[in-house]
Amino acid sequence: MKIAFTTKGTEWDSIMDPRFGRTEFITLYDEEKDELTNIDNRSIESVAHGASPQTAQKLFDLNPDVLITGNGPGGNAGRVLAQANLKIFVGAGNMTVKEAYNAYKNGELKGF
């Protein structure tokens, strides 16, 4: 299973980014390979409008099974992600990536 996180860094101890559309990084964890990879999303900061749908398109292209984020995507991004059959969990905004992963595994995050 592939799990995507919205993050402010590239490591397990990085802080989660509560924002979806303007997240600094998308961190992917492949449970089968036990591998962490990162997509730099910082260029989205300069986008005036449509940041969330653009970030959603990146996620759609990466094809993860789960997204863990802080506040969740907005309406337009939510529509893009709905087409990907992506399970979305929110409420991880004040955690590290590792804490968010553990909270997800323990059923402590809210479904979106």
Image: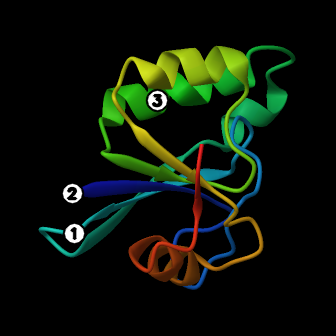
Proximity of marks 2 and 1: CB atoms separated by less than 8 Å? yes
Kind of residue indicated by mark 2: Met
Q: Secondary structure at mark 3?
A: helix
Horizontal side of residue 34 vs 40, given as left or right: left
Local packing at callout 3 (Cα closer than 10 Å; few below 14, some 14-19, many 20+) is some
Q: Secondary structure at mark 2?
A: loop
The structure residue drawn at horizontal position 36% and vertical position 57%, both measured from the top left corner, is 3
Picture quadrant of residue 44:
top right
Residues at marks 3 and 2, CA–CA distance in whole angstroms: 18 Å
The structure residue drawn at horizontal position 71% and vertical position 56%, both measured from the top left corner, is 70
- In this view, the mark in front (3 or 2): 2
* Precedes in sequence: disc 3 or disc 2: 2
Residues at marks 3 and 1, CA–CA distance in whole angstroms: 20 Å
Residue 1, numbered circle:
2
Residue 31, numbered circle:
1
Residue 79 appears at what percent x and percent y?
Answer: 55, 15
Kind of residue indicated by mark 1: Glu
Residue 1 appears at what percent x and percent y?
Answer: 21, 57
* Precedes in sequence: disc 3 or disc 1: 1
Q: Secondary structure at mark 1?
A: loop
